Image (cartoon, coloured by chain):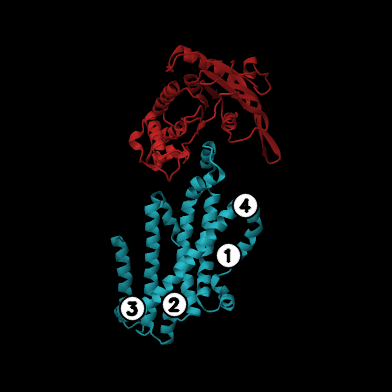
Chain colours: A cyan, B red
Amino acid sequence: MPRLSTLAVFLAALALWHLASNSGLVSTFLLPSPRTVFETLIELAGSGVLAKHTLVSLRRVVSGYLLAIAIAVPCAALFSLTPALRRLIEPLLEFLRQVPPLAMMPLLILWLGIGEAQKIGIIVLSCFFPIFLGVRGGIAAVDRKLIDVGTVCGFSRSEIMLRIVLPSALPAIVVGLRIGLGYSWRALVGAELIASSAGLGYMIVDAENLARTDIVLAGILVIGVLGLITDHLLRDLIQRKAPWLAGDLEMARA
Amino acid sequence: MLEAHHLGKSYRLGDNEVTALADVSLTFPRGSITTIVGRSGCGKTTLLRLLAGLEQPSSGELRRSEGGPQRIGVVFQEARLMPWLDVAGNVAFGLRRRLPPEAIAERSRAALDMVGLSAFAEAMPGQLSGGMAQRVAIARALVMEPDLLLLDEPFAALDAFTRRAMQNELIAIWQRKRPTIVFVTHDVEEAVLLGEHVLELERGRVVGHEPVALPFPRDPTTAEVNDHRRRILAKLTAPSPASAPLPEAAANAIAT
């Protein structure tokens, strides 16, 4: 449950928005009132348009995010276990990390077309590095003293990895996962704004072309709420499965 | 029986080679309790890490005679509990999964009983005091049913009262189970209170061996304990120990 102070901040932002659009200082065309936007939202929901675009976007985020996890976690584990490989490849990865994923968009469109693969590709590129660096950093920071405990217990290398290294690295992994999730939403909307025929990003850019700022704002609100909900679900899952990580979760506010 | 023959360990620090341990030959008779005392940096922990197999010697060797220790338990200076496991999970940590779950639970319960923490089986490490965490670490070592128990200043961070209680607990466990114990400390009184044999270590060399034939539990205020303390302190504070020839007793520190 959100705290009262959190609700108060949201309500205050809503009140400011209401005042700005109703005071006449800002044109209602540029900034429709909250009431108009909520009415538009209800209308979009009623017609099924919102559900259609939301489902398309959600499917892309989930696919891209899971694919990024499936690539980043084994890559990071492999790099951590083989220092020679890490020294060889890491400078190249560092170079790629500096390139904003959206700058890769023209290339991805050429390589993968304008279908789902390109959008999921952008999401994978966006959340790969936070997840990869989270796992790498987590493994690198494992306390040698805990590994000593495993050694005196007679554990094999794989037992030490599974029973000590991975659980120890979990706080940093969780931070990477949460930051990655936030990045995946940002990348998705970017991808849908540029080349798409469905999804919340498309809904927003289509509304802009029709000069429907109320739909633009409705789309932005939905994306924000979906981001909050998915982040909350991930936090909830972590808190249930790994309650000792409660403190580390706060580090992951991207 | 566990024997160290001319054990040496050196490390590279930049361009320098630092000798942590030099030509240490020791014998630990089965079921004995030996304390190793010396100031910080004298090589105590290095010796214990070699005995535990956590490091390999630069020279010399360790020998385990037939019937010698197979299962080793180690208690470190810090509790080193896994923060993601509760107390019971930490105690059972070293037990392999091939043991049936009931056997693991039974052995963990018995070990927790031994250190008086049965009521805290479900507590998380963050909820324990320093003394309790260290008792969990001892239980984790005991649950392995070790025939060699190595302890590296395990009570150093505890207050005087908890420390005394833990020392008595350790002696009670030793009397019940009779593992071979090697206990490292920088506290001379603790070394005398716990050891049948006290080895004095200075700059990586064994500089003395003090047999202590007093009954357990020992009272730190008695004249006999004080005599032993005084003798050990005299040897440890003697001038230029590194250049002094090794006392005969130290060359093969424990007569067997």
* Residue indicated by mark 4: A82
* Residue indicated by mark 3: A20
Q: Is residue B36 visible?
A: yes
Residue A73: give x, y in percent of width and height. Answer: 53, 58
Left or right relative to B83: residue B52: right
* Residue indicated by mark 1: A97
Camera-near label (2 vs 1) is 2
* Residue indicated by mark 2: A201
Residue B204: give x, y in percent of width and height. Answer: 63, 27
Q: Earlier in the sequence, mark 4 or mark 2?
A: 4
Label 2–label 1 contact, CB within 8 A:
no
Q: Earlier in the sequence, mark 1 or mark 4?
A: 4
Which structural element holds mark 4? loop
Q: Earlier in the sequence, mark 3 or mark 2?
A: 3
Camera-near label (1 vs 3) is 1
Residue B80: give x, y in percent of width and height. Answer: 47, 39
Seen at 54% across and 37% down, the residue is A154
Q: Amino acid at mark 3?
A: Ala
Q: Earlier in the sequence, mark 2 or mark 1?
A: 1
Nearer to me, B237 or B61: B61
